Image: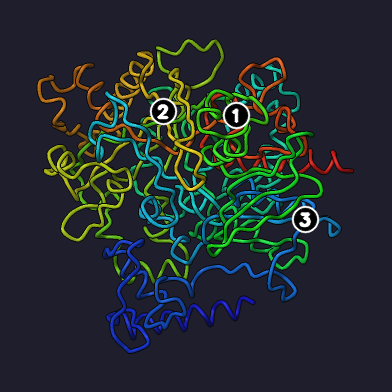
Amino acid sequence: MKSVAKLFTTSLILTIVCVKNVHLRNKNGQPKRPNASFPQTPMMELLAQSIAPNIVQQNPGDLFDILRDKYPLPNGLKSPFTEYDYIIVGAGSAGCVLASRLTEDPDVTVLLLEVGKPENILTDVPSIAPYFQRTEYSWPYFMELQPGVCLGMENNRCYWPRGRAVGGTSVINYMIYTRGRPQEWDRIAADGNYGWSYKDVLQYFMKSERASLQGLENSPYHANSGELNVEFVPERTRLIDTFLEAGRILGHPTVDYNAPEQLGFGYLQATIHGGKRVSAAKAFLHPNKKRPNLHILPMSTVTKVLIDPSTRTAYGVQYARNRLRYEVRARKEVILSAGPIASPQLLMLSGVGPKDHLSRLGIPVIQDLPVGQTLYDHITFPGLVFTLNVANLSFIESRITRLENVIQWIQFGDTGVSTTGAAEGIGYIKTPLSDDPDEVPDIELISIGGSLVSDGGLTGSKAVRRGMMIREDVFNEAYGSVDNTDTWTAFPMLLHPKSVGYLELKNNNPFSHPRMYGNYLTDPRDVATFVASIRHVQALADTEPFQRLGAKIHPAQYPACKKLTFDTDDYWECAVRTLTATLHHQIATCRMGPDSDPLAIVDPELRVYGVARLRVVDSSIIPRTVAAHTNAPAIMIGEKAADMIKETWR
């Protein structure tokens, strides 16, 4: 197998060298126009020419169709069954795990329905993660207009891209692997959610994990026999060691931040292998897609859960595929793993949700539940930029976008192409404003080997700023003078927002996006915590390690903040309200809780209250904010749910 891979790599490199100046061509030999969903940028063009030069496609409208993973029905089946034991809606992080685990039993049949396409070879490239925020692999969700936030974004609206792919958001995210603090999971259990303490969930985090973390080989908090690769990023800048050294000076030890003992700073742990992305689909579905009892249907939109109104029992789903409508039945359970936006939307479309809201839209109410009425999100301020006086120090796209770098990445998995969107380190801090009695952080700092300006210049893609939907005029006025230069930043992530949002249906059309209200920064304590985190990043930059690099804060000028004095608290509040960006961690829209919890949608075994044989298994069930990027918790939830479901039907 290794010799085949080596031969393929060698052949590919020779092809690249021979045809590096040849554009993709159609059947008539003419240059092919790229799919509009993949931006024409130097990095994308180089990768396309390097990986698949001069190919002829079967599907003229899809540039990378030939390079996509394929999920044909097994055993030569031409169409799916009309009935399965389990129907899983959504092949995201949780759904992929669930489908894999349930079909370990050869006597069980599972249908996995996913609205998106399979991932392609370009989604393997960690450094271009920002590109996929505005492609066919993302749901282009927008928060409803909220005064006072996202003032520098297009149309003054916050952009909420979610994964639309086999693999879900794990196909487009920044691959960061974090689990949350022990106290946070223990509190969830103490609320009445039996089986969800830190001790309970740790075994499921570790069940999935295949860690290869140098120096942590003997850690009792990591495992190496699972399916999900967790590794340190192979290519780093000097800035990460500077960040860790500065942290130690300010009292933050260098630690494994996924270990429970103490808060601190550490090297980024990522879901990658050999410098390439490992999505949930790649880890859990691809190796098992030939199982005869696992049927995977991409590009299939579930429009309704079928529920018997007299017995309140789920018995199947309706879905649309290739412009045709189908119904399929479940002998045992229907399981929603469509994510924190689509799962509550589908519940409400099916008659499970707030009675008054559904009645106004003409949807027959089967079960009155507060679906979507609780929504938490992690937001960040990406605009804290420090200039440096040392050249060639940070990741800059124009340096990465070189043929020799791509060739080396293909062969060895290193070079700047392997960086996870330039994220290099994680630091947990507890600001003086925290009112938490336990050792729980209120801010996560994401150390970047560069900053917002690293994707710019004449040849830059501007993918990061465009992925956040920052208005070009706002960006140019604030950062134009330092665009495409060596810089450093740390993104502060608000871990436990006091502000609570919600979502509801726009109408009863399953193809409409729901209305989403983040209610960002409506609680003044969230603003104060952001300002405190900015002061802490400034203190890091003022330490001797960063001063050796000439770190100096860039005085960004935002249109909305012109009357405010730079570096005052009022200025920073205005800056945060100008560049208010989600980190794609929406939770609690299908909140888990005991039957005494008036906001709960599912019980601790993830069964929907009042509806038999219907569960929700994804990050929407997390009832409290946790200090974690939600990909790893979603995979853990899939693991735990699989065991609970097996036990139910044993």
State which mark lies toward you, 3 or 2.
3
Q: Is residue 432 above or below residue 462?
A: above
Q: Is residue 244 above or below residue 191?
A: below
Q: Which residue was labeled with disc 3?
A: 84
Q: Compare marks 3 and 2 and give the one earlier in the sequence.
A: 3
Q: Which mark is residue 518?
A: 2
Q: Which mark is residue 415?
A: none
Q: Position of residue 513 (x, y in %)?
A: 44, 42
Q: Compare marks 1 and 2 and give the one earlier in the sequence.
A: 1
Q: Which colour assignment does the render follow?
A: rainbow
Give the SS element for disc 3: strand
Q: Distance of mark 1 from mark 2, alpha carbons?
A: 19 Å
Q: Quadrant of the N terminus?
A: bottom right
| CB-based contact (under 8 Å), mark 1 and mark 2 | no
Q: Residues within 10 Å of mark 3 (few under 14, many from 20)?
A: many
Q: Compare marks 3 and 1 and give the one earlier in the sequence.
A: 3
Query: In the image shown, does 51 or 441 lie closer to the viewer?
Result: 51
- The residue under label 3 is which amino acid type? Tyr
Give the SS element for disc 2: loop
- The residue under label 1 is which amino acid type? Gly
State which mark lies toward you, 3 or 1.
1
**Quadrant location of residue 12?**
bottom left
Q: Quadrant of the C terminus?
A: top right
Q: Residue furthest right?
A: 650
Which residue is located at x 49 percent, y 44 percent? 509
Q: Residue furthest bottom?
A: 28
Which residue is located at x 44 percent, y 29 percent? 444
- The residue under label 2 is which amino acid type? Gly
Q: Which mark is residue 353?
A: 1
Q: Position of residue 99 (x, y in %)?
A: 70, 53
| CB-based contact (under 8 Å), mark 3 and mark 2 | no
Which residue is located at x 42 percent, y 57 percent? 136
